[in-house]
Image: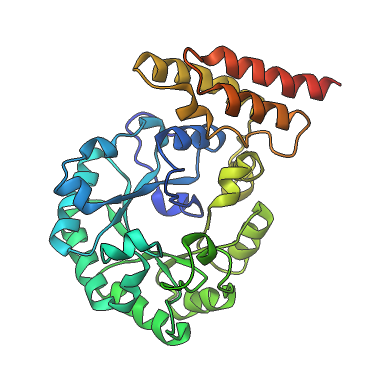
């Protein structure tokens, strides 16, 4: 954990990061993940520049100070609007501002941002240049290896050259193409084949850039293999959300060499004061506990833990005592 007023080393944190995931990596999820790892770089859900700048939804930038190092991911395609949103993010205290050039959803495409921007690298360069000019914190990019009928071995190096030329030194590459028509966002996470080798080749070709790999990585063992092979960082998404203990509890020791490790029970107990504060502020229990369902994945009692929270956390008056009851199923199963 960071000491008060200590500035995080974001590039170091990016050795392992948790992917920005819509509807998942909100501030409650990030608080939970930070309790599990003091070093890992955390990302917000993608926030659109129009929502922040035109819609005035600056409350979406709220986060817990314990989350550092934490990065803000923005979606957009207008350089001036992205610059304004970056300025807001930097003022809010985020440690990094990231541009989404990877999301393939129809909703994102209709706003002319996300993965469709892989087709317009000059526009991406204009966007990140404007963002960097407006933001005192580092601006980074998360992209795909290509979209639709593009040949990744041609477009990806050209794309990296464009953003490097305007000062981007850190990029996360999802090692799959995105098909903008014909595949759903879920299918785009599974069907296009992974090309890890190409991402490793980009690190060789762009040795001066900090390159992280994303896509299909589900264990710390796999993360360590990519790092040992020369990549600077690994970003993990769904596996870190659905089975956070498998990824995050050992991350500080294995990825960062920090002698800090906790356990799922300790983390669950540490969430109770946070839940109390959230409820006192008018929040609902399930807004927090929905992110905790996978905390004991693969352990005895995990099913009863999930069932207790998923079925009853939405009920009026549900509070931290329900979490303690659910914990009894896990500890009881372990004792048995």
The x and y percentages for residue 220 are 65, 52
Quadrant where the C terminus is found in the figure: top right
- Observer-nearest residue: 176 or 306? 306
Q: How is the image coloured?
A: rainbow
Q: Quadrant of residue 163?
A: bottom left
- Observer-nearest residue: 121 or 258? 121
Q: How many marks?
A: 0
The x and y percentages for residue 92 are 24, 39
Q: Residue at x 60, y 44 (%)?
A: 242
Q: Residue at x 57, y 32 (%)?
A: 292
Q: Residue at x 36, y 28 (%)?
A: 4
The x and y percentages for residue 278 are 40, 20
| Position of 239 relative to 99 (above/below) | above
Can residue 315 be seen at all in this image of the molecule? yes
Q: Quadrant of residue 44?
A: top left
Instruction: Say left or right for 171 vs 53.
Output: right
Instruction: Say left or right for 208 vs 272.
Output: left
Q: Residue furthest right?
A: 336
| Position of 231 relative to 149 (above/below) | above
Can residue 141 be seen at all in this image of the molecule? no
- Observer-nearest residue: 198 or 68? 198
The x and y percentages for residue 259 are 62, 37
Q: Quadrant of residue 200?
A: bottom right
| Position of 326 relative to 213 (above/below) | above
């Amino acid at each position: 954990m960071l000491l008060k007023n200590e500035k995080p080393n974001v590039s170091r944190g990016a050795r392992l990061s948790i992917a920005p995931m819509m509807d998942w990596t909100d501030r409650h999820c990030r608080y939970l993940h930070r309790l599990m790892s003091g070093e890992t770089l955390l990302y917000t859900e993608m926030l659109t520049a129009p929502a922040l700048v035109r819609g005035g939804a600056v409350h979406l930038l709220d986060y817990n100070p314990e989350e550092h190092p934490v990065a803000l991911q923005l979606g957009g395609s207008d350089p001036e609007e992205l610059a304004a949103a970056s300025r807001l993010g930097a003022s809010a205290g985020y440690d990094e501002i990231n541009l989404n050039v990877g999301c393939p959803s129809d909703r994102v495409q209709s706003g002319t941002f996300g993965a469709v921007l892989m087709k317009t690298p000059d526009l991406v360069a204009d966007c990140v240049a404007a963002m960097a000019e407006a933001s005192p914190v580092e601006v980074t990019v998360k992209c795909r290896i290509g979209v639709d009928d593009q040949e990744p071995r041609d477009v990806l190096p050209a794309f990296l050259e464009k953003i490097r030329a305007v000062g981007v030194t850190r990029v996360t590459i999802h090692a799959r193409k995105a098909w903008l028509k014909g595949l759903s966002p879920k299918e785009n996470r599974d069907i296009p084949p992974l090309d890890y080798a190409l991402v490793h080749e980009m690190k060789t070709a762009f040795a001066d850039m900090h390159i992280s790999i994303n896509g299909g990585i589900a264990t710390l063992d796999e993360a360590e293999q990519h790092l040992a092979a020369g990549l600077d960082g690994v970003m993990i998404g769904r596996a870190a959300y659905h089975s956070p203990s498998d990824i995050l509890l050992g991350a500080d020791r294995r990825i960062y060499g920090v002698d800090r490790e906790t356990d799922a029970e300790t983390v669950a107990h540490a969430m109770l004061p946070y839940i109390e504060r959230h409820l006192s502020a008018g929040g609902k229990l399930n807004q927090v506990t929905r992110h905790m369902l996978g905390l004991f994945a693969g352990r005895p009692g995990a099913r009863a833990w999930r069932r207790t929270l998923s079925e009853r956390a939405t009920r009026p008056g549900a509070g931290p005592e329900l979490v303690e009851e659910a914990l009894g199923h896990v500890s009881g199963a372990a004792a048995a």
